[in-house]
Image: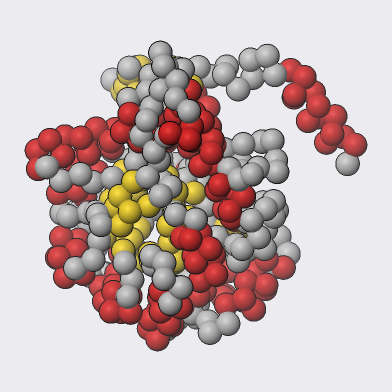
Amino acid sequence: MSYFIGRNREARYTYGFDDVALVPGNITIDPEDVDISMNIADIKLKIPFLASAMDGVVDVKMAVAFNKTGGLAVLNLDGVNTRYENPEEVISELVNASNDKATEVFQKIYKEPVKPKLIAKRVEEIKKNKVYCAVSSIPQNAEKFGPIARDAGADIYFVQATVLTVNYYSSKIKTLNLEKFIKDMKIPVALGNCVTYKVALDLMEVGASAVLVGVGPGAACTTRGVLGIGVPQVTATVDCAAARDVYFKKTGRYVPIITDGGMITGGDVCKAIAAGADAVMIGSPFAKAVEAPGKGYHWGMATPHANLPRGTRVHVGVTGTIEEILLGPARTDDGTQNLAGALKTSMGAVGAKNIKEMQMTQIIIAPSIKAEGKLLQKTQVVGMGRQK
């Protein structure tokens, strides 16, 4: 639905996770009988969860632990793990910087150039543990970093930008030919990020093995505030999933949609899948893991940008192991642990046996769903806060 916002301008109403709810089904299913597995090309994941390619979320240790649970953690090749032989020392400096100096420290540390030998070394360190290795870079570095990662044994390469389009103009930098890059890589290549039907379809048509959806929804991302761009994740996912379905009908090739960012709880994940996602990529909830390199801190990929930082460092704390956060048992009651269990339970409640059936779940507009009848909970939280 569109609304006139003045003169001859129209604005479409869009929806985020807090605006909608899922309707229980006519049948229910035992969560143990629900299948939440999915494929990205020939990579089979037991659970549809990816860890964001952020330095506070994924290093070699985290990638191995995460991938052993059946998900897929993505290592940022533009980050500290490929700039420094001992990234742990640098991470300590980043997390211990004072708030007023944090951005300055980030910019200083990320000036160190990426070293090709460290790209290969990190991939080899992950692969020796007999798990999938997923890596990511910005488009400007893909042609240089991609072959190094592939030859070292990477299983899938992610090309990620704040906004990625097939057609890009620059008078100063060489444009990445996405179609040629994908053909030359000879391993699956995922592309993102986007939020519209047309761009998602374009990315599929040049050969993407998966498409990432989301511009600015992450907890540590300030893109929406700095640049004023973005589309709420439910609407963005629905639109891009529609492109996937049209492309599949046209070509017979299925390209998974991965909703990237903006999800904190199991309920958010369930809504993303119901909106059409095949999997989700998450940052801040996984930054809370014991294994995460950020030691309870989380920051966006564009936080250290030299000219226009579009991220911030946030303290998320450490709440449990990655196994507890993904698979349980949960030790918190806020929906941030046992995310896979929450997805299975929700799918059972709506009568969906697998991801494809979950994507057909009825969605309603229900902005009051989180507050309705929850006065005592809200009072208790406020009361607890005052006691600190």
Near-viewer residue (143 or 103): 143
Q: Residue furthest right?
A: 387
Report the residue at 48% width, 35% height from top.
Answer: 32
Q: In which quarter of the image is residue 185?
A: bottom left
Near-viewer residue (104 or 63): 63
Report the residue at 48% width, 23% height from top.
Answer: 349
Would you place residue 333 above or below residue 57 in this image? Answer: above
The percent position of residue 250, horizontal first and vertical second, equals 9, 38
Would residue 77 be found to the left or right of residue 263 on screen? left
Would residue 260 be found to the left or right of residue 291 on screen? left
The percent position of residue 71, horizontal first and vertical second, equals 44, 54
The percent position of residue 285, horizontal first and vertical second, equals 58, 48
Split into 4 quadrants, where in the image is the N terminus? top left
Report the residue at 38% width, 81% height from top.
Answer: 120
Would you place residue 358 above or below residue 78 in this image? Answer: above
The percent position of residue 271, horizontal first and vertical second, equals 45, 30
Near-viewer residue (187 or 115): 187
Would you place residue 250 above or below residue 185 in this image? Answer: above
Q: Quadrant of residue 311?
A: bottom right
Observer able to see residue 93 = yes
Split into 4 quadrants, where in the image is the C terminus? top right
Near-viewer residue (111 or 331): 331
Would residue 330 be found to the left or right of residue 176 on screen? right
Would residue 159 be found to the left or right of residue 301 on screen? left
Observer able to see residue 308 = no
